[in-house]
Image (cartoon, rainbow, N blue to C red):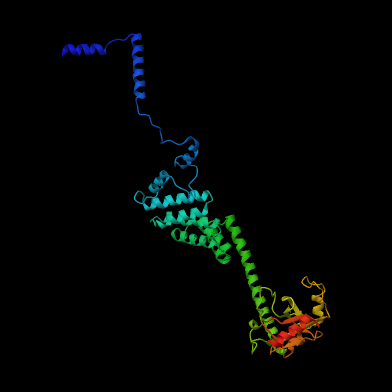
Amino acid sequence: MENTSKDSTSQVNKVYTDEERLKLAEKLDGELDDFIAGLEKRSYTEGWPEDRWQEEMEKHPFFMTKCPGEGEETSPLVEGLQQLKYDPLENTPEELATTYKEEGNFNFKCKKYRNAIINYTEGLKIKCLDDDINAQLYNNRSASNFFLKNYRSCLTDCQLALKLKPNYPKVKLRAAQCLFHLRKYQECIELCDELLKENATDSTVISLRTSSLSNQKEALRNERKKVQEEKKAEKEKEKVLQLIRERNIKLAGVKGLTSFAQVEPNFPEITLQPVHTDENGRLVWPVLFLYPEYKITDFVQEFNEDVTFDAMLEEMFNETPGWDEERKYLPGQLSVYYQDTKAKPCKVNTVCSLGQVLSDGRYVVNAGTPGFSVLVANSKEEAQFLQDLANS
C-alpha cells in the first residue's frame, strides 16, 4: 500500500518538459474534438429567425417599444407578466388600484384618453379603502373626460373626487371649467369664489370667473329677448286668427278656429313660414299651384291677400319655366281653378285678389295652404281636367 501510494505521488508530482507539455496539450485537443464530433447533431429551433428578429423583439416585454393594440395578439410572456401584475392574490387592493392608475397615467401621457378612462375605471372597481387613491382615480378620469369634451362626465367625476378629498384645488378648477362649458355660469362663479378665497391672485380662476360673469349677463339678456319674441309671436298668431275669422275664411276640418295649429301647413319642409301678416297688417299666405298637364307643383312662399292672380301669374311666368318646352304657359292665357266644398271645379276670376277668393264661401283652405290648379286656357288639357272632375 505504501509503495503504491508512493508511486502514485511521484507520478502526480512529475515535472514535465516543454516538449512533453506540448504533446499532452495536442492529445487533449484531439480528444476534445473527437468528443464534440461524436455528439448528436440537431438544429437549434429555440432562437429568433434572422429575417424576423426585430418582430420577435417587439413581442418580448423587455424589448418592446409599444403596448399591443386592441385586438392584437399578446405574447405568452406579456400575458404572464400582466396576470402577475393584476393578480389579486399577489397584490393588495391598494396596490392593484395604484397599478391601474399608473397604467391610466401612461395612456393619458400618450393622449389615449379613452384607454386611460378604462384603466381608471378598473382601478375604481377595486374599491380599495384608500380615499386618497380613489380621489386621484376620479381626478385623473375627469381629466381624460375633459380632453374628450365629455364635460358632464368630467363634472360628475370631479364631484365624486371632492367628496373623498374636499380640499382638492386642481379638481375644483376643472369642475369650474366644466360648469362654464355647460353654461352653468352661476355655479361656476360660486366655485371660482371658493378658489379665490384660497388664492386670491390665481389668474386662471380670475379669468374664468370674469368670462362666466360676462356670459351670464349675455345669457340673461338673450333669455329676456327670447321671452319678448315669444310674446310677440303669440300676439302675431292671435292677430292672424282674428283676421281669418273676420274674413270668414273656411278651413278644412275646422268648425271653430281657436288654435294657430289649425292653420299651420302640413308641408313644413317646404314652407318657410305659415300664414302671417305684413307690416300693414295684411294676411300673407303660402300658396300651392298645381299643373295637372305635367303633374308637377309650384310653391309660392308669400302671396299677399291684396295681390291679384293676374299679378302673381305675371311674376311667376315672367321667365318661361324649364318644364314648359312649348312655351304655352303665358300670363293672360291661363285658367285657374279650385274645388269648392262639394269638390266641384270653380274657375277663378284672375282679376280678383287672393283675399277675395279665399273669402268666397265656396273656397276651403286645406292644411293651412291654399291650392290652385293652373292650365292653358281653352286647351284640350283644360277640357280633360274639367271632365275628370265632373266624373269623379
Q: Quadrant of residue 21?
A: top left
Residue 190 falls left or right of residue 362: left
- Residue located farthest toward the left when viewing the structure as drawn: 1
Q: Is residue 69 above or below residue 45?
A: below
Residue 77 in sight from this viewpoint: yes
Give x and y (percent) for residue 284: 74, 80
Give x and y (percent) for residue 42: 38, 31
What quarter of the picture does the N terminus occupy?
Answer: top left
Give x and y (percent) for residue 39: 35, 27
Give x and y (percent) for residue 55: 49, 40
Q: Is residue 371 above or below residue 185?
A: below
Q: Is residue 74 above or below residue 20?
A: below
Residue 80 falls left or right of residue 147: left
What quarter of the picture does the C terminus occupy?
Answer: bottom right
Pick the residue in front: 201 or 184: 184
Residue 307 in sight from this viewpoint: no
Residue 186 falls left or right of residue 383: left
Residue at 77%, 82% in the rendered image: 382
Q: Quadrant of residue 228?
A: bottom right
Pick the residue in front: 258 or 361: 361
Pick the residue in front: 27 or 281: 27
Pick the residue in front: 383 or 75: 383
How many tags in the picture? Answer: 0
Q: Is residue 142 above or below residue 2?
A: below
